[in-house]
Amino acid sequence: MAQTTDHMLRGILADVLALKPGQADALTRASGLFGHLPELDSMAVAGLLTEIEDRLDITIDDDEFDGELLETYGTLLGFVEAKRAP
């Protein structure tokens, strides 16, 4: 069975940000990301976006990215799901 986008995105967050075991699984759609997770600082953003592009086979254009994209887990997940939609 193929992994869901949600499951894959949680794995990317856990790997790139070196989150504690279970920390990514505990994220809800309302969970804050940038400014709420100390691991997700300005230095980590580029690595996170690159990894999302690579693992989920999507392209994130510069004009699509703004601070709101990383406001909550739900915002990021919705964006990635829309990018992966056929």
Image (tube, grey):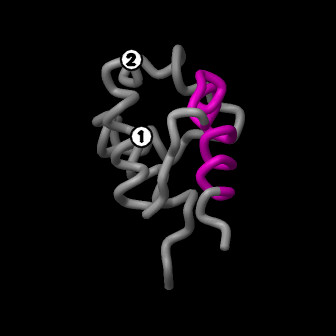
In the rendered structure, the answer to whether residue 68 lies left or right of residue 40 reads right
Range of magenta residues: 64-82
Q: Residue at x 43, y 63 (%)?
A: 57
Q: x, y percentage for residue 50?
A: 35, 44
Disc 1 element = helix
Side of 3 where 14 appears, left or right? left
Q: Position of residue 5 (x, y in %)?
A: 55, 62
Residue for badge 2: 42
Check residue 49 in the rendering and tell me which mark sits there, or answer none.
1
- The reply to whether the C-beta atoms of the residues labelled 1 and 2 are less than 8 Å apart is no
Looking at the image, residue 63 lies above or below residue 25 = above
Q: Residue at x 31, y 36 (%)?
A: 47
Point 71% across, 33% down: residue: 30
Q: Residue at left 61%, top 37%?
A: 64
Residue 17 location (% of width, % of height): 33, 34
The verdict on residue 63 being magenta is no
Instruction: Tell me if mark 2 has few (under 14), some (14-19) or many (20+) residues whose alpha carbon lies within 10 angstroms of its own.
Output: few
Q: Is residue 74 left or right of residue 16?
A: right
Relative to 4, does residue 26 appear above or below in the rendering? above
Q: Amino acid at mark 2?
A: Ser
